[in-house]
Image: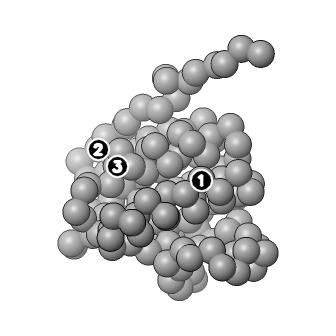
Amino acid sequence: MTAVHYSDRLRSVCSSDTAVIDCAGARVSAHIRGPATVLVVEGEIDMCNADRLVAAIRRLNQPGTPFVLDLRAVDFMAVSGFRELLAFADECNQAHVGWHVVAGTALRPLLRVFPDHQLPVVGSSGPAAGSG
């Protein structure tokens, strides 16, 4: 089996107020909102891009800055993507990082199946913050 690396798919696209990283099926954009950063994820999260997506979240998040991970525009989240999110959450909790997750329709079923998830989930109505 040959490992394939897609370094060209993890690239930043910057505008005046937004940074966007393409993660092969998902996109993460960072928006500064007052004292926090809002990271908006769009697309599908599966075993092919979950680790790249978490790497992009780490890259866009500023150390010491609270952030919101907005997952309302995620169309599909595989269990592998949820597992990566839980590992990332554990890192954030151990580092005492202030953050919250805004769940969308793709994440809600996983939250019900795994009720002891320890994710700092907040309200989830309306369109994704900063998108559109």
Q: Nearer the viewer, mark 2 or mark 1?
A: 1
Q: Which residue is mark 1?
A: 84
Point out the residue furthest to the top here: 2
Which labelled disc corresponds to residue 60?
3
Mark 2–mark 3 contact, CB under 8 Å? no
Judged from the image, the secondary structure of the residue bearing numbered disc 3 is helix
Circle 2 SS class: loop
Q: Is residue 79 left or right of residue 125?
A: right
Q: Quadrant of residue 82?
A: bottom right
Q: Residue 15's x, y, as percent?
A: 29, 44
Q: Residue at 60% across / 36% down in the picture? A: 24
Identify the residue at horizontal 43%, vertical 51% (top origin).
57
Q: Which residue is mark 2?
A: 15
123 w.r.t. 47: above or below: below
Which residue sits furthest front?
A: 94
Which residue is rendered at x = 32% and y = 70% of the image?
96
Residue kind at label 1, given as amino acid type: Glu
Q: Can you give x and y, in whole percent of width and height, for residue 29 in the image? A: 42, 52
Q: Amino acid at mark 3?
A: Leu
For marks 2 and 3, give the CA distance: 14 Å
Q: On the picture, is 129 further left or further right than 16?
A: right
Q: Secondary structure at mark 1?
A: helix
Which image quarter is the N terminus in?
Answer: top right
How much space separates mark 2 and mark 1, taking CA atoms?
28 Å
